[in-house]
Image (cartoon, rainbow, N blue to C red):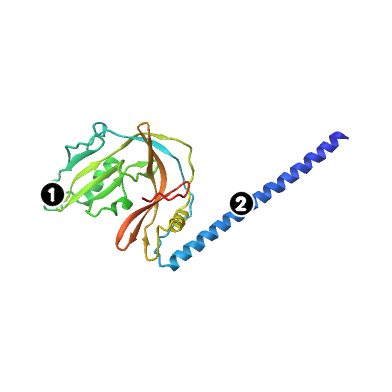
């Protein structure tokens, strides 16, 4: 008799557990819908305030924390043809002059054109960074080292092509090394959620123009000689014809704008 009672009790417990799990799942579904609706309302509010927004993604991406060291210039990879090392007092940066044949250059000065600097960046394995380049008032172009598929948004891990009145004449290279993944990948907030967070933090206001965002690795702190990087959503915002970079922690949604 006791065995039968135990079986009935276990059956009841399983039914109650199923009901609880179903209600919990439904609550999560409703919550997700409510969040989506709230984001849509905020986006509409921004547009009503004449904030120019880009086309944005609602796709969830995955990333992790990483640790890395700044590479010493003596350990950096061999320079491509057409570059000549120049002196630098910083042991973590390599400065090189771009040597271009005047007869082959499109510019009479013999300085590099856009196709030349792209070729050099490709040989180093760095990709064009429109967010950082937009902050350059002197015509410099920034290319970034990529780590686990994300470009670096800091002075370390960048390739800067320095522009003068004669064109692109030299470059400054910084590189990260001994890169270590600190945790397994975890979901990040979406680009839409990052835009909503910027609005809640009053980083974008009426009349502002927001660029498309992208995920970057951004240095958060330094520990025992290693720099710790976390993924951030980064955007350019134009206010009164001046551009600045806005950053949102891609894990927590916290505002990291300086």
Q: Viewed as shown, does residue 18 lie left or right of 93? A: right
Q: Report the number of numbered marks.
A: 2
In which quarter of the view is residue 93 placed?
top left
Q: Viewed as shown, does residue 115 lie left or right of 205? A: left
| Lower sequence index among marks 1 and 2 | 2
Q: Secondary structure at mark 2?
A: helix
Image coordinates for residue 98, horizontal then vertical, percent: 17, 44
Bin the neighbour count of mark 2 within 10 Å (Cα to Cα): few under 14, some 14-19, many 20 and up. few
Q: Viewed as shown, does residue 1 lie left or right of 88? A: right
Can residue 116 be seen here? The reply is no
The residue at 39%/43% (across/down) is 149
Image coordinates for residue 35, horizontal then vertical, percent: 55, 56
Bin the neighbour count of mark 1 within 10 Å (Cα to Cα): few under 14, some 14-19, many 20 and up. some
Frontmost residue, 206 versus 119: 206
Frontmost residue, 173 versus 244: 244
Frontmost residue, 3 versus 116: 3
The residue at 46%/55% (across/down) is 197
Image coordinates for residue 14, horizontal then vertical, percent: 74, 42
Can residue 184 be seen here? The reply is yes
**Image position of 231 with respect to 135: above or below:** above
Give the number of the disc on residue 69.
none
**Image position of 32 with respect to 101: above or below:** below
Q: Secondary structure at mark 1?
A: loop
Q: Marks 2 and 1: in contact by CB < 8 Å?
A: no
Frontmost residue, 77 versus 164: 164
Q: CA distance from mark 1 to mark 2?
A: 62 Å
Give the number of the disc on residue 110.
1
Give the number of the disc on residue 28.
2
Of the two numbered discs 1 and 2 in the rendering, the one whose residue sits closer to the viewer: 2
Image coordinates for residue 110, horizontal then vertical, percent: 13, 49
């Amino acid at each position: 008799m006791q065995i039968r009672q135990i079986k009935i009790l276990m059956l009841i417990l399983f039914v109650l557990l199923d009901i609880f799990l179903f209600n919990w799942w439904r609550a999560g579904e409703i919550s997700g819908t409510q969040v989506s609706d709230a984001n849509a309302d905020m986006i509409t509010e921004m547009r009503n305030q004449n904030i120019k927004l880009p086309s944005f993604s609602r796709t969830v991406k995955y990333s992790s924390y990483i640790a890395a060291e700044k590479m010493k210039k003596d350990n950096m990879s061999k320079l491509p043809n057409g570059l000549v090392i120049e002196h630098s007092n910083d042991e973590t940066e390599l400065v090189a002059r771009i040597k271009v044949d005047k007869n082959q250059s499109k510019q009479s000065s013999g300085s590099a054109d856009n196709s030349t600097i792209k070729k050099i960046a490709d040989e180093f394995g760095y990709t064009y960074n429109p967010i950082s380049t937009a902050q350059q008032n002197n015509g410099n172009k920034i290319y970034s080292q990529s780590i686990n598929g994300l470009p670096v948004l800091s002075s370390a891990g960048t390739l800067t092509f320095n522009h003068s009145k004669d064109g692109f004449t030299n470059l400054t290279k910084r590189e990260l090394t001994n890169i270590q993944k600190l945790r397994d990948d975890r979901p990040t907030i979406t680009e839409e959620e990052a835009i909503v967070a910027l609005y809640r933090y009053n980083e974008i206001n009426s009349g502002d123009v927001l660029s498309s965002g992208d995920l970057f690795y951004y240095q958060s702190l330094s520990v025992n000689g290693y720099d710790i990087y976390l993924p951030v959503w980064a955007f350019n915002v134009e206010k009164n014809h001046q551009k600045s970079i806005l950053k949102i922690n891609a894990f927590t949604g916290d505002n990291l704008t300086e």
